[in-house]
Image (cartoon, rainbow, N blue to C red):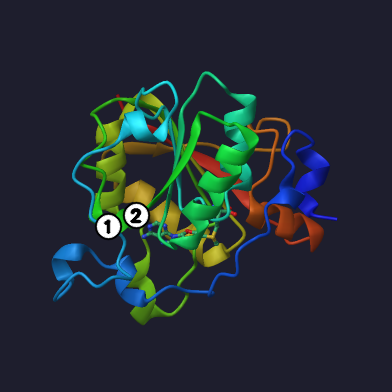
Amino acid sequence: MDRRQNESPQIAWAKYPIPRVRHHANPQVYMPASQQQFIASWYPPVREKAEWAAWFANGRPADVLDLGCGRGAFLLRHAVSHPQLNILGIEVRAVLPDYINGVARGEGIPNAHAEWYSLANGLDWIQTESIEYAVYFFPDPWPKKRHHKRRAFTVEFLAMLHRVLKPGARLWLATDREDVDVHQREVIGASPHFTLGPNETDQSWPFPFCTDQQLLCDSRSIPYVRYSAIRNL
Ligand SMILES: C[S@@+](CC[C@H](N)C(=O)[O-])C[C@H]1O[C@@H](n2cnc3c(N)ncnc32)[C@H](O)[C@@H]1O
């Protein structure tokens, strides 16, 4: 049985075959458009403005960002359990937003949408201080030093999130990789815009449902840490 079924009786996952995804996209998608010689067809569209009316049934802007939302198990369940919030996923691999938006349409989840977009191009199209909270769960680790430049989590990334998050809002984080954990804590420590929150437990973690990667970790007893970066006022 689909692992997501256990915790998502209200989403008929079996109706939506999971698309085959190559493990990694072309490495250039992790680099900003400004560094491309030309914009190839496989490069995610460079967005200048949001299309809220097309993305959410109520036409309102996003309230929550799911950055690198993957296959969207968390995004979709999050939207079902918080119908008052518009949840926007951002994902660099095109087939995944297509899949998520297909499930949202098929299941009638009007407040969930995912966009094919690279975080490397920033979030200028999102209104200042408009987001209640953001999540960044189980990011790609890029363990080799020469690949670190593909990591989205940088001081500049936090500055960009500081602009779009409401004062005091949180960026929720989870990872099963020690090197990613160390990297994230270093970046948060170097940012004037965020303060590191405490490690969370099952009891203190505010989300009662899992991401796809978290389900995989749980099924293989792989440990992970969860915490937040709190946006300074
Ligand atoms: C390991 S997966 C985790 C997915 C999901 N958050 C989860 O916990 O199951 C990391 C995701 O981030 C996406 N990603 C990596 N870099 C990105 C970028 N620059 N912009 C948007 N998405 C990105 C990857 O394509 C991948 O789907």
Residue 28 is tagged as: none
Residue located 31% across and 45% down the image: 158
Does 100 sit left or right of 148 as displayed? Answer: right
Q: Secondary structure at mark 1?
A: loop
Residue 117 is tagged as: 2
Query: Where is 139 relative to 36, above or below?
Result: above
Asked whether the beta carbons under mark 2 and mark 1 sit within 8 Å of each other, the answer is: yes
User: 67 or 204: nearer the eye?
Assistant: 67
For disc 2, does the CB lie below 8 Å from ligand 1?
yes
Q: Position of residue 168 (x, y in %)?
A: 38, 24
Query: Where is 167 relative to 15, above or below?
Result: above
What amino acid is at disc 2? Tyr
Query: Where is 121 relative to 81, above or below?
Result: below
Closer mark to the observer between disc 2 and disc 1: 1
Residue 199 seen in the figure: no
What amino acid is at disc 1? Pro
Crowding at mark 2 (Cα within 10 Å: few <14, some 14-19, many 20+) = many
Q: Position of residue 66 (x, y in %)?
A: 47, 43
Residue 45 is tagged as: 1
Q: Position of residue 91 (x, y in %)?
A: 43, 54
Residue 100 seen in the figure: yes
Q: Secondary structure at mark 2?
A: loop
Does 99 sit left or right of 68 as displayed? Answer: right
Residue located 60% across and 64% down the image: 19
User: 58 or 169: nearer the eye?
Assistant: 58
Quadrant of the drawing holding the N terminus: bottom right
Label located before the other in sequence (2 or 1): 1
Q: Position of residue 83 (x, y in %)?
A: 57, 22
